Amino acid sequence: MKTLLFSSLLLFGALSFAQTNPCSKGDCQNGYGFYYNKETGDVYHGFYKNGAYNGVGYTQNAKNDYYWSQFKDGKANGFTVYDEGQGRTWGIFVNGVKTGDHVREIRKQGGIQRELITYENGTETSRKMYIPAEITEATCISGDCTNGYGIYYQNRTLISGKFEDGSFKAGEMVHIDTNTSDFFMPPVEESFQTPYFKYSITGTDNGTNEAAYMSIGAKANGEYVLLNLKQNLFAAALFKDNQMIERF
């Protein structure tokens, strides 16, 4: 189903960066818009309210730092996936300020490594590396998979995240056979009716499809933003119960 969502959105999604108007697509006041400032190199691909980034979106600056988040008044907010030049990282932002534990992916050939970085009001307070010695089925291969941060492996899925009483609370699930990863922090309640932010990546022969969207349970519900940088493809939509109801 995820592949079908990607395919339908990517069709006709290419953008040109030659426009003179920074808001080169959509509505950069209230709704979906694509913004590119040639002078600063800033890009925003996502939803707006009152002229500010509000809702699901992707922003990138001239240094190629990027943030996928549910923005609030122009700032990253809540569970966010980002890269500030040191590798893909996930963690919580409060009004643009890092807080709590953030986990950074360390890309090493032939190995799985993660770095846990803890922040207090935007100030880094500690760092710790997690390097599994070996991968064993249905095992916590690094860290604390009961109450803390750990890396768990089962059924060709690698779970890197925060755990509480043995339950997954936030982080990344890597599905090895399908070459996909999902990053999310599920809601605390168990009725699966509360929307939450989710970021997914899927590797393909023609670039990586990246998507951020609001989800209820396993279904896309609400704002949905997708890109494939290799193809210069950008798309956005609104979904209800995994069905696209409007595309931008």
Image (tube, grey):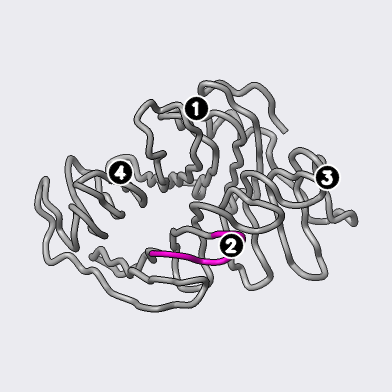
Q: Residue at x 34, y 30 (%)?
A: 190
Q: Residues within 10 Å of mark 1 (few under 14, many from 20)?
A: few
Q: Is residue 1 visible?
A: no
Instruction: Point out the stretch of residues depicted in magenta.
Output: 94-101
**Amino acid marked by disc 3:** Gln
Compared across the picture, whether 197 is left or right of 174 comes to: right
According to the image, label 1 marks what residue? 4
Q: Give the image location of residue 222, x and y in percent.
A: 59, 31
Distance of mark 3 from mark 2, alpha carbons? 21 Å
Q: Disc 2 or 1, which lies upstream in sequence?
A: 1
- Residue 69's place in the image compared with 39, above or below, is above
Residue 234 visible (yes or no): yes
Q: Earlier in the sequence, mark 3 or mark 2?
A: 3
- Say what secondary structure mark 3 lies in: loop
Label disc, if present, on residue 29 of the rendered structure: 3
The mark that comes first in sequence, 2 or 4, is: 2
For badge 4, the amino acid type reads His
Which of the two discs, 2 and 1, sits closer to the camera? 2
208 versus 86 height, above or below: above
Q: Which of pointers 3 and 1 indicates the residue nearer the eye? A: 3
Q: Amino acid at mark 2?
A: Tyr
Under circle 4, the secondary element is strand
Query: In this figure, which residue is indicated by the disc labeled 4?
Result: 175
Mark in the foreground, 4 or 3: 3
If the image is split into quadrants, where does the N terminus sit? top left
